[in-house]
Image (spheres, grey):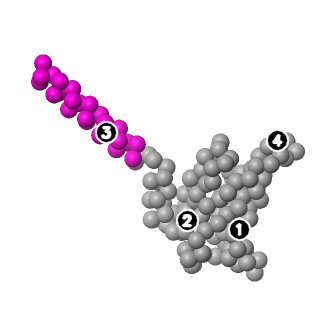
Amino acid sequence: MLVLMFRLLIVATFIVIVYSIIRYTVHPERKLAKAHENKQFYLLDDEKNVRKNFQLTYKGTLFEGEKYLASTSKSFAVVRIYMKANKDDLQGLRHEDFRFIEEEIRLHYPEATVEWNTPIKEFLKN
């Protein structure tokens, strides 16, 4: 009886470890951190939750987007997105990079206009 309980405990421990490893590898925030380290593009967003901001990383810079919901002629949709980033991380980014980010955002939110925070806004005006 004691041997059977010990075996069940070992099997349960093994299942918990495998489950934890799988959860860790598919967790979206871990994917965002890995893309940030590798300087790749990754968008982490819950499109169904308008109140939750989204994060994206591109070329080693982490951006945060605030979504604003309003009515359109057809329905309620996200109509404005305010993007911000740490200005110390913007070194090396060009106009084309910000246009790429805007296009990727418009793929998810076609009704939205993208507004940038202060240092980026002035850079894009030039």
Gap in Å between the C-alphas at discs 4 and 2?
Answer: 31 Å
For the residues marked 3 and 2, what is the alpha-carbon distance in whole angstroms?
Answer: 31 Å
Does the residue at mark 1 contact the one at mark 4 (Cβ under 8 Å)? Answer: no
Mark pair 3, 4: CA separation: 44 Å
Asked if residue 37 is positioned above or below residue 110 in the image, the reply reads: below
Residue where numbered disc 2 is placed: 62
Residue 106 in the image: x percent, y percent? 71, 55
At x 48%, y 52%, the residue is 29
Q: Which residue is mark 1?
A: 116
* Kind of residue at disc 4: Ser
- Residue located farthest toward the right when viewing the structure as drawn: 73
Magenta highlight range: 1-24
Q: For mark 3, what is the residue?
A: 18
Sequence-first tag of 1 and 3: 3
Q: Which of the two discs, 3 and 2, labels the residue nearer the N terminus?
A: 3
Q: Residues within 10 Å of mark 1 (few under 14, many from 20)?
A: some
CA separation in Å, label 1 and label 4 = 25 Å
